Amino acid sequence: MTGAAGGGGGLPSHETEQRAYMTRITPPGRSHPPAGETEARSPLSLWQPHADFSTMEFSSRMPLRLAAFQDLIATIGAPQSVWPTDGRPSPISALTPHAWRRVRRIKGVVWFAECRSVRWILQLSGRQRIELRCDGAWEGRPAVQLVAIGQQPWAAAAEALRSALHRAREPDATALAVGGAGDETLCLPCDADEQARRVEAAAVAQRLRACGRFEVVEPPDTGGAGAEGRKRPREAGEARLGLDGFDYSPRLVHFQLVGASALGISRRELETRHRVDVDLLTEQFVTALNFSLGAAAAEQPKPLLTGARCSGAPPAAAGQKGSAADPRGAFTARFALGGACSLDTVWPLISQVADEVISRELAHVNLCRCDV
């Protein structure tokens, strides 16, 4: 990520400086490791950090709540007057607009409570450009390990960012059992009120279905249960996954960008007649949304979506009768429930980017039926 990813307004950027940057924090006044410590001999170890930039490391054996992380990202570049709030304690309270203005890059490995079995690679660069990529199942003990690079003066901003990340953690059962949470302020699950979560899930699904761009993907074990937990007929704009291996969390809403309704055709026709790969279309949408600078330009909260392949089969609506399921599963976008940043708050940019992707990627679709 280059170009727009660098600092603006004439400020120096770590992306454009022809220097190496150390990602290991060196305590003030110490230029070399103390006795007993070793340091890998590499070109990086021969450089001192550039005076204009410094680093902050954050690690945790507790996962972050994805909903809380969405809230934190929503504040990047947005005036504090439009920061999402719902009256509950939030990690956002630890931040200030000044803190984000000092951040130049954040990268590392993330563990989310809503999808504990997989690790995510995070790269945040410059003005709101974010890449959040699923990196498969954990091979060792899960943890959060991040490094932030900031521009001086950095100390206050680094402490605010560290505090916000600490508050975004969700204690797991093991941490609580051994007293690992202590007296720290943690982001407890917001799904204690099961009815409230179901109502929010139903509202999010309805918003996605109603616009005609998306299809909501439900796991096979819900029986199509609605907000009240009762079975209901499947609605238009709703797909189902066909295998029990779907990596489902009731705190996430899965959906795909399809765009068939906007063209006045069915998803089946879009995929079979016009050879559109809905998985790829959804992946391009998630990437474009997370990279978008539109929220900063409009001074609105920035949306963040995660996206990955499910361990189940592609939606039944997508395949032909008797066709083999893709063993990798369907690629779905995910919105986390329970945060202060609701889907309605970031909907304008989500719908705008969806329209841009549909216009670009479906431009080849010829709706003429002269050959029929």
Image (cartoon, helix red, strand yellow):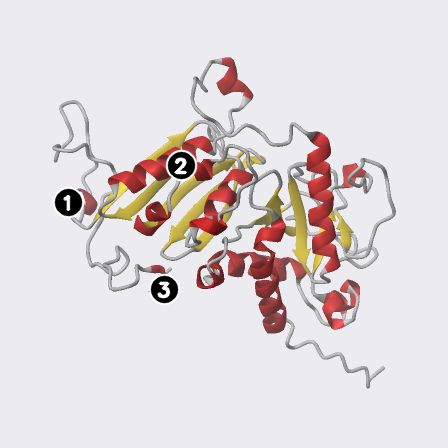
Q: Is residue 314 visible?
A: no
Q: Which mark is residue 4?
A: 3
Q: Residue at x 34, y 65 (%)?
A: 3
Rendered location of residue 199, percent (x, y): 73, 40
Q: Nearer the viewer, mark 2 or mark 1?
A: 2
Q: Is residue 190 visible?
A: yes
Which quadrant holds residue 42? Answer: top left
Q: Nearer the viewer, residue 245 or 369?
A: 369
Residue 35, compared with residue 56, is above or below; it is above
Sequence-wise, the earlier of marks 3 and 2 is 3
Q: Residue at x 40, y 51 (%)?
A: 124
Question: Which element carries disc 2, helix, strand or loop?
Answer: helix
Sequence-wise, the earlier of marks 2 and 1 is 1
Q: Nearer the viewer, residue 142 or 66?
A: 66
284 left or right of 168?
right
Q: Nearer the viewer, residue 93 or 285?
A: 93
- Residue at mark 2: 94
Q: Which mark is residue 48?
A: 1
Contact flag, marks 3 and 1 (Cβ < 8 Å): no
Residue 162, compared with residue 275, is above or below; it is above
341 left or right of 277?
left
Question: Which element carries disc 3, helix, strand or loop?
Answer: helix
Task: Count every numbered label the image shows and give the total.
Answer: 3
Residue 209, compared with residue 356, is above or below; it is above
Which quadrant holds residue 67? Answer: top right
Rendered location of residue 368, percent (x, y): 77, 82
